[in-house]
Every structure is written in C-alpha cells, then in structure tokens.
Amino acid sequence: MNKLKLVLIVLLLGSITPAIAGGLLTNTNQNVAFDRMLSRDASIGIDGVYSNPAGVAFLGEGIHLSLNWQLVFQSRTIKNNYPLFARNQENNSTEREFRGHAFAPVLPSIQAAYNWKNFSFQAMFGVTGGGGKCTFDNGLGSFEKIVSETAAGATGLAGVVDKALGTKLFTSDRMFGDKGTYSFNSFMRGRQYYYSLSLGTAYKMNKNLAFYAGIRGVYALSNYYGYVRDIKVGNMPLYQVLDPSKSNAADIELNCDQTGTGFTPILGIDYKLGRWNFAAKYEFKTRMRLKNESVNQAPSIGNLADNLSAVVVKAAMANNMSQAQAIEYATQKLVTKEVAGAMGMLKQQFDTKLTEATGEFEDGKSIAGDIPALLTVGVSYNPIDPLRINAGFHYFYDRQATSYNHKEDKLKRGTVEYNAGAEFDANKFITVSAGWQKTSYGMTPEYMNDKSFVTSSNSLAAGACLHVSKKIDVNIAYFHTFYSHYKTNEDVILNSQKITYDSDYTRNNNVFGVGVDIKL
C-alpha cells in the first residue's frame, strides 16, 4: 500500500488562472481597441495608457477617457490514458476526458489621461491577471490517477495482512477485494483576480520624442475549493480503516483564500519619425506574496494499524474467540516483519506527501507568486492617411519570477509573443480593423500539469471603431484564440511494473468587447 498518496490531490487544486491574452500571469487585453486589432504597442490612442503610455503624450490637450467591458469564456480540455482507470467501478475504460469552463461575464477596464502642455497625467484600472473562475465538475485526471493508485496499494497491503493471518479477510469481496477496483466523487473550482491601479506621467520632449514613468499597484484575490469524497476500494469505504467513527475520515477538502499586494514600476518611450512610430515599454517584476486563509481537511494515516487490528479482532470474535484471545491473536499477526515494514513505510511516505501536498495551502502561510517582468516593442506605419499597420513583440521574463517551490526553474525560457494588425478608416463614421497574435510559452513536460496549464496559441481578431461624434468613439470587437495541443507522458512504477500516464492538453478561448472613448 506504499502507493497510497491520496493527499497529493490537494496539490492539484493550485493556480487555476484563466489567462486571456499574454503571459502566464498577465492579461494584456486591457482595452477593446486591443481586442479588435491585437497589435497596439506603437499605436497612439487613449488605450496607450496600458499598451504605449509614452505615446499618449501626443494626443491633444484635455481629458481623454476610455471605458471598456469584455466578456470572456474559455474551456480547457484534458485527455488522459492510464491502465489503472480500467479498474473504475463506474467506467472501465482506460481513457478519460476532463473539461473545465472559465467564465468572466464582466471584465472591466478604465484608462484616463489629462494632457496639459507637454505633460500627460495618466491612470488606469483593470484586471491585469487572472480574470475569472474555472470549474471542473468531475475533478481532474490526476485526481483519479491517485485514487486508482490508492486502490492498488490498498489491495497490496490487504494481501500482506491476509498472508500473515493465513486467511482471506481484507482481500475478500466484501472488503478491499484483490482486483484494486475503486469509486469516488470529486470536484474542483479556482477563482483568481489580480486587480490593478496604475498612475504615471508622460513628458513630450519635442514633437517627436516622449518618455513615461509610472507605477502599478496590484491586489490579488483568489479562492480555491475542491474535494475528493466517498472513496471506496472494492466494497469497502476507505474511511473504515482510517477512522470508522467518521464517515468523512478519508475525504479531502480544500477551501483556501489567497490575498496579496505588489507594485510594478513601468517605463516607456515613444519616437515619431514621419509616417513611422516606434515605441517600447518595460514593466518590472512585481514581487507578490500571497497570504493564505484556509479551512482544509486531509485524512490521517496514524490510526491505520489500530483500525486494522480492530477489524481482525472483530473477525476473530465472530469465529468464537474471546475478546482477550482475539486481541492477542491480532497483536501477534500484525507485528510480523512484513506487516510492520509495510505499515511503517506507508506512514512515513504518507506523512511526507501530506506535508508536500498541503504546504502551499496551509493556513497563515505566505506563498511566492511574482508577476514576471514584461518588455514590449512596437512599430506603426501609416503608408496612406486612412491606413495604419502595426507590429509588435512581447517578452515575459517568466524564469525570473519566483513561484511556489521555484516552479519557474522548470521552464526552458520566458513567454514570447509576436503580433501584427491593421486598421483602415473606411469613411468618417467607421474604422475597421483586424489582427493576429502568436503566443509561444517556454513549456516543458516537467512544468505541465492539469492544475494550471497553458499551451502555445494563435489569436485572430476583428472589429470596428464607430465615430459617433467628434468627442465619442465606440469600439466593438471579437477575438478567438486557437490553442495547440501539448502532450506529456509520465512513467509510473507500480508493483515493479512500468505503466504510462498520458496527457493531452488544449484550450479554447473567446472574447467579446465593447468600449467607449470620450474626449473632453
């Protein structure tokens, strides 16, 4: 039963972040103008408060305001294949498909600027990380993997004990049996929002050159809730050998709130040259430490020996032994070298894995969750007055951002993005636009898991800007992200045999947006 790693399931309820556009922890879609074009790194507009803050200094004097609403829905699909899944009492296939749904019905953002002489005073509010919740109604494949291994381990220990007893007790069909079959119920949900408020100032040195300096404050608010319940091995509920007085003794439940704050210094530059515009922005790393407030439950294996002994005593008394004789019999049989060794190894491994699994979510603990630094570079070209063509490059310094247990070290590089877009003034009432963005993550098989995964993608966008009046523009947009598949293979040694756990990860993402830009 040394494969009993049930508490590892808690670890799988980690960062469920429905990243929308950008890096591992960064949402770059902060304005509907971006949604309709996907390339705004060198554009000059009020949306530049986020994408090109130095360029905002070239807008006219006065107040500029942008109010944006986005609706985001995303699905995550994970396909697993594992030989032990065939032992599930309700589904004997080795293949599983798990679908999670992330939904953010209201993703707001506000950009504002007051331009006075050569100065541009700017502010922005948005959700620059996270942005919704993701729910897996049936848990994850890694949940079932651990339960299936638990069942295999339980029947293994049952066999060792029955061999010592010289009878078929724990491996009988009314208890664990000898086939390692199992059943269980599971669920998980993660919710994560990184609210931010930025303030900064741009200064126009001359008609061609402007600089920007600012700072963003970030407040992280997350909740993770999930459980694995009603675990049964064969026909025996697992709680009966952990604590038969409590029907939830084998249940795992996680309910953890995480909060934290951080600050991001930001620098920007914009340079105009005839019909060309060049811009760059650098966001420094945001140091985040998330404070846990948790009400968690995990099983304990400390009473396993006593509970197994109680079952043996009860069975012996049913065979006409006195209580004293039954206790002596159980004591003699369960202190053999084989049984004691199996239980000792089990308890040591179980306690170690419990600490590893629950460490990230322990109540009162502070967890590292830095937002990586970001470099953006863009160029815009205006070949004819009605047409603007943009291209941009993003690099997220993911490997320099500290995360729990230094998971960032498992990445081979940071995230790289390329984008291009164009907008055309069809007439004085409407501007149409379209764009493309490619996102390439530095994933490795060691980094990927079903608790928090991303796969490289291509996004396509289209939309329009309606010029309602000289002072009001309305942006409407839609973009869709096409994610690639990422496959991993994990070799598992079980009873001296190697079996493989296969995973296939992908996503699907849709964003609708409406925004209003106002000039005062």
Image (spheres, rainbow, N blue to C red):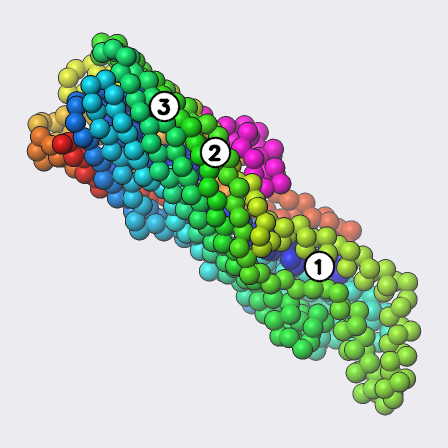
Q: Which residue does the numbered mark 2 point to in the structure image?
A: 286
- Type of residue at label 3? Ala
- Type of residue at label 1? Leu
Q: How far is mark 3 from mark 2, CA to CA?
A: 16 Å
* Residue pictured at 57% horizontal, 46% vertical: 366
> Mark 3 or 2 closer to N-term?
3
Q: Is residue 497 visible?
A: yes
Q: Is residue 470 above or below residue 187?
A: above
Q: Is residue 89 above or below residue 435?
A: below
Secondary structure category for the residue under label 2: loop
Q: Which residue does the numbered mark 1 point to in the structure image?
A: 4
Q: Which mark is residue 213?
A: 3
* Residue pictured at 16% horizontal, 34% vertical: 518
Q: Is residue 418 magenta?
A: yes
| Relative image position of residue 238 (x, y in whole percent) | 67, 70
> Mark 1 or 2 closer to N-term?
1
Label 2 crowd (10 A; few <14 / some 14-19 / many >=20)? many
> Mark 1 or 3 closer to N-term?
1
Region of the chain picked out in magenta, as a range: 394-421
